[in-house]
Image: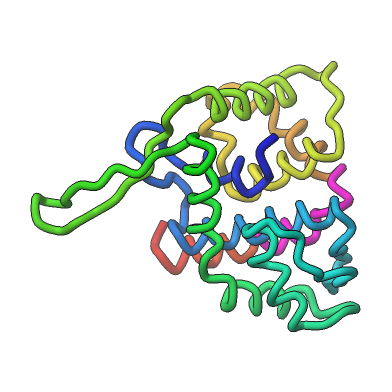
Amino acid sequence: MLSFAEEIYLLALDDSTGQFSLNGGQAALRQALIVAILGELSFQHRVDADVETLIVLDATEVGNPILDSVLTPLRALGAGPHPLLGSLDELNQRVSDVTTLTRQELMRKQIIKEVSGRLLWVIPSRRYPVVDNRELVDVERRLHALITDPDVIPDPRDTVLVSLVAACGLFPEILSPREMRRHQQRIDSISRLDLIGGNLIQSLQNQNLAIASACGY
């Protein structure tokens, strides 16, 4: 099973070009991955959040480099509640390698690969196209069925993923414009079921809007 961070990374990645489709670019992707990791940590009862606070319950390392990249600065914050926005700002400043770690994990699992080349035949560049569409298609198919079929009951992980994908503006990569219009209410309804990451994801939406505006997206 892929983590939230890995699923968001794949959904934001153009599977053929290896470039990102997320408004706000790398800055917005890093924000999304950090919130995705916090969502993952909440399932492990390491963090919790309410409207104004991020609550650190247990910041002991777990041996997973992606999760530990966030647990390390959380441990520096100390146990107990901390202001939510301030904590996210702190994490965004200190967790510089979360994108690299997520990419490395997907490469280790042979889901994406590194392709070296040159931009304009001069500037060295790297891109990371998807090796096998199976994992990406599985995520997209699961989300598509969940949103378009009212008989599909979302489990707690589904609600977090739907909230993350909606906050990142990635549903247009999965649903047609007509499907988006028809099922927006269901997306909103499922997102509201996310009792774990709802406040974190609302903060992500606000921050990504600010990033996209500053970058002219």
Q: Quadrant of residue 150?
A: top right
Q: Relative to 161, say whether 52 is above or below.
A: below
Q: Position of residue 106 (x, y in %)?
A: 52, 43
Q: Quadrant of residue 6?
A: top right
Q: Relative to 176, say whether 205 is above or below.
A: below
Q: Position of residue 30 (x, y in %)?
A: 54, 61
Per the rendered image, the range of residues in magenta is 193-204
Residue at the spot x=80%, y=39% of the render?
Answer: 157
Q: Position of residue 14 (x, y in %)?
A: 41, 37
Left or right of 208, for residue 124? left
State the quadrant of the C terminus: bottom left
Looking at the image, how many numbered discs can be counted on the residues? 0
Q: Position of residue 61 (x, y in %)?
A: 76, 66
Residue at the spot x=77%, y=44% of the render?
Answer: 160
Residue at the spot x=40%, y=65% of the render?
Answer: 215
Residue at the spot x=24%, y=54% of the render?
Answer: 125
Q: Quadrant of residue 114?
A: top left
